[in-house]
């Protein structure tokens, strides 16, 4: 149960208001509630949020006073640009942990996928500002954004991943990351928080990748290899995937056979996915290798690999298509990263809601019906 809109916003009480108290006409909780409700109802920028608020002031006053009405879009933009983004992310992580704790047990390990996305129009090149690149953690089974971390323009995801992991409860979870996260320090950070890792292995580890690929191409006699095959036919293509795993891994990192050979803690399995895709009469083949700290059977491994791509299809794609994230032109201060948190809040509420219709239609329902919007805020939709 999320509670009503007022209690939901109260969970962000630790967020400090950067404005001078004596000059505040529009309290921070009112602004947060307005932005969340307007975003759920279809508003994609501060101007639309102001228009929506003026049309639905009575609804907002069910939860908070709004004694001075609705702030202007300039006021909204100025405040969001100044909010402490790290504190806002911490509040979000604490809020979503409550949603996650009350979600039903899915059975098997919970897959948490970590991946990055760039908000393409958030740049201000005249001021030397690169587009916002945000790293997100996605609970695939529960369809929840668990947290986010900004990737500094002067670094890359390798430095942001450990900071994001520190925000998350990982006990019993299986954390999946693309090849950029295939680092010993990241594997150690996952295990230190009680989780297991499943890391993609690509050309950034060429020798290890080549050894794993060669192993599955011709497994040595006596090496037990489990396999599981799946097939999909949709969007004009037929894809067959063959998943292979082996739990005998001591040979891989048993000694230092070449300089800087990586050694991964508690390595328990290697895996490979061989996919064959037929589209328009053409066949494409691909192999992907993995290192893991959990002894997954081939079928569980297949589900985990498939679940990882949910962050692309159900998070990044949804943000671009349903929330028009790639068209957002926020460029001031902390505005882009703070509004990303608001969108993630809205997305989590929509994913937990009914009826079983598209997120686009759920968002439209929230704009058409304040009763449905109230149900979203209360977690009863």
Image (cartoon, helix red, strand yellow):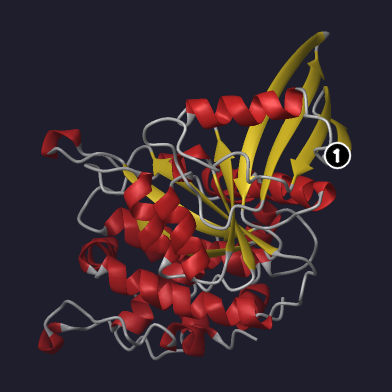
- The residue at the point 12 percent across, 84 percent down is 23
- The residue at the point 21 percent across, 42 percent down is 154
Q: Judging from the image, what secondary structure is the residue with disc 1 in?
A: strand
Residue 65 appears at what percent x and percent y? Answer: 39, 91
- Residue bearing mark 1: 227
Does the rendering let one see residue 278? Answer: yes
Of 185 and 19, the residue lying toward us? 185
Query: 349 above or below 282?
Result: below
Residue 131 appears at what percent x and percent y? Answer: 30, 40
Tell whether 122 sits left or right of 359.
left
Does the rendering let one see residue 374? Answer: no
Q: Residues within 10 Å of mark 1 (few under 14, many from 20)?
A: some
Classify the position of the N terminus by image quarter.
bottom right
- The residue at the point 66 percent across, 70 percent down is 369
Of 198 and 373, the residue lying toward us? 198
Residue 126 appears at what percent x and percent y? Answer: 13, 34
Classify the position of the C terminus by image quarter.
bottom right
Count of numbered tags = 1
Instruction: Pick out the residue farthest to the top.
Output: 281
Instruction: Pick out the residue farthest to the front.
Output: 255
Q: Residue 305 sits in which quadrant?
A: top right
Q: Residue 351 sits in which quadrant?
A: bottom right
Tell whether 190 sits left or right of 334.
right
Residue 256 appears at what percent x and percent y? Answer: 45, 38
Of 124 and 25, the residue lying toward us? 124
Query: 274 above or below 74?
Result: above
Tell whether 348 sits left or right of 124.
right
Query: 53 above or below 337?
Result: below
């Amino acid at each position: 149960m999320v509670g009503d809109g007022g209690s939901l916003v109260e969970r962000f009480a630790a967020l400090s208001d950067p404005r001078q108290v004596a000059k505040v006409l529009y309290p921070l909780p009112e602004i947060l509630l307005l932005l969340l409700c307007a975003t759920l109802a279809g508003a994609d920028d501060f101007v639309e949020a102001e228009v929506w608020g003026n049309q639905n002031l009575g609804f907002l006053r069910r939860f908070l006073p709004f004694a001075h009405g609705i702030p202007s879009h300039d006021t909204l933009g100025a405040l969001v640009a100044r909010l402490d983004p790290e504190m806002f992310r911490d509040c979000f992580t604490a809020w979503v942990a409550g949603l996650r704790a009350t979600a039903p047990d899915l059975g098997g390990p919970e897959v948490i996928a970590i991946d990055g996305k760039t908000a393409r129009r958030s740049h201000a090149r005249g001021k030397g500002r690169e587009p916002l690149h945000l790293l997100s953690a996605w609970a695939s089974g529960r369809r929840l954004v668990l947290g986010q971390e900004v990737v500094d323009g002067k670094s890359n995801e390798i430095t942001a991943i450990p900071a994001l992991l520190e925000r998350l409860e990982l006990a019993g979870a299986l954390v999946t990351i693309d090849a950029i996260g295939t680092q010993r320090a990241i594997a150690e950070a996952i295990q230190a928080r009680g989780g297991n890792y499943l890391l993609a292995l690509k050309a950034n580890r060429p020798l290890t990748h080549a050894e794993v690929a060669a192993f599955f191409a011709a497994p040595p006699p006596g090496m037990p290899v489990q396999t599981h095959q799946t097939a999909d036919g949709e969007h004009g293509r037929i894809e067959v995937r063959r998943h292979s795993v082996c739990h005998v891994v001591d040979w891989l990192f048993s000694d230092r056979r070449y300089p800087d050979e990586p050694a991964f803690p508690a390595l328990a399995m290697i895996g490979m996915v061989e996919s064959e895709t037929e589209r328009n009469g053409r066949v494409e083949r691909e192999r992907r290798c993995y290192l893991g700290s959990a002894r997954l059977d081939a079928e569980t491994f297949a589900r985990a690999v498939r679940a990882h791509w949910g962050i692309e299809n159900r998070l990044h794609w949804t943000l671009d298509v349903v929330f028009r994230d790639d068209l957002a032109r926020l460029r001031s201060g902390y505005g882009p990263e703070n509004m990303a948190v608001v969108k993630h809040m809205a997305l989590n509420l929509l994913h937990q809601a009914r009826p079983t219709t598209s997120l686009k239609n759920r968002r439209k329902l929230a704009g058409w019906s304040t009763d449905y919007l109230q149900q979203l805020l209360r977690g009863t939709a």
